[in-house]
């Protein structure tokens, strides 16, 4: 399974998301149409911006596609495992927040 690193930010533009998950922006836009769970908002410049939650969902979609599932297969699988996927995404986001807090504490200790 590929390891994706997400930089510490609140929202990401589609180009950044493309680099994070390793898919072209056109694929991400296509997935937005296919998966209603993906709901990026537009910033004041009209650009799509994605939260950590949406990036995690895109990673799930990519991993399922890379494992050989079709779009319809991914939809079916996500519907059947909706709660598990949601829990997984929430857990990963909580871990990311904890990691950021630990890194902040480490920086404070280094200054002492």
Image (tube, rainbow, N blue to C red):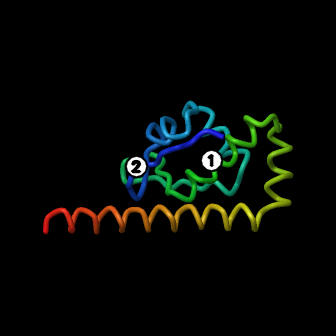
Count up the numbered dots.
2
Could you tell me which secondary element the residue under label 2 belongs to? loop
Q: Earlier in the sequence, mark 1 or mark 2?
A: 2
* Label 1 – label 2 distance at C-alpha: 15 Å
Q: Quadrant of residue 110?
A: bottom left
Residue visible at 48% across and 45% down in the picture:
5
Residue visible at 86% across and 52% down in the picture:
76
Give how far across and how far down residue 109 sits, in percent: 21, 68
Q: Quadrant of the C terminus?
A: bottom left
Q: Nearer the viewer, residue 36 or 54?
A: 54
**Residue that extends furthest to the left in the rendered view of this protein:** 112
Give how far across and how far down residue 35 sits, in percent: 72, 50
List the residue tagged with mark 2.
7
Give how far across and how far down residue 21 sits, in percent: 55, 39
Closer mark to the observer between disc 1 and disc 2: 2
List the residue tagged with mark 1.
58
């Amino acid at each position: 399974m590929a390891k994706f690193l997400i930089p510490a930010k609140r929202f990401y533009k589609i180009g950044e998301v493309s680099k994070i998950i390793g898919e072209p922006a056109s694929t991400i836009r296509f997935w937005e149409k296919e998966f209603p769970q993906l709901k990026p908002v537009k910033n004041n410049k009209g650009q799509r911006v994605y939260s950590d939650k949406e990036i995690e969902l895109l990673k799930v979609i990519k991993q399922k596609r890379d494992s050989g599932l079709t779009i319809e297969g991914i939809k079916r699988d996500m519907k059947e495992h909706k709660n598990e996927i949601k829990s997984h995404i929430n857990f990963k986001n909580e871990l990311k927040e904890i990691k950021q807090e630990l890194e902040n504490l480490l920086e404070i200790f280094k200054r002492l």
